[in-house]
Image: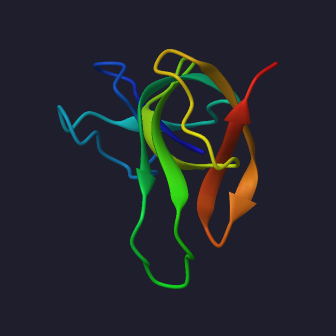
Amino acid sequence: MGSICTACDHRSVRSEGRCERCLGTTASATFGPHGTVWAATTVHLRVGERTPPFVLAYVDLDDGPRILATVNSSEEPVLGARVRISGDRDGDVLVEESR
């Protein structure tokens, strides 16, 4: 869920009435569920209630914004890998590699 600017076509996961880029009017939009991994890393430190290690990835959603997601695997996906949103965990978007 997010928004698309009606003036500049900027896509965002935020659902605000004004575009964060040009301040134009936005419309509600739904993105996903598929995308491409832009970057990924394994986190080896405890963050909140998360037990390390866990994998995070920036994903460019098809027709949508870039999001930070938790990878539903202990292995980092290859850059450029195709992934899909597989759900959420504690408010974080989960992705897994598309097969």
Instruction: Estimate the x, y position of residue 63 in percent, counting from the top left.
Output: 54, 17
Q: Is residue 57 left or right of residue 30?
A: left
Where is residue 46 shown, x and y percent of the image?
Answer: 43, 78
Name the residue nearer the viewer: 23 or 56: 56
Quadrant of residue 91 within the rendered picture: bottom right
Q: For residue 12, which quarter of the picture? A: top left
Q: Quadrant of the N terminus?
A: top right
The one nearer the camera, 27 or 10, is 10
Quadrant assignment for the C terminus: top right
Q: Residue furthest right?
A: 99
At 17% from the left and 31% from the top, the residue drawn is 22
- Residue 7 higher or lower than 85, as above or below: above
Image vertical order of residue 72 relative to residue 81, above or below: below
Give the vertical position of 75 relative to 55 (above or below): above
Between residues 24 and 48, which one lies in front from this camera angle? 48
Q: Residue at x 36, y 19 (%)?
A: 9
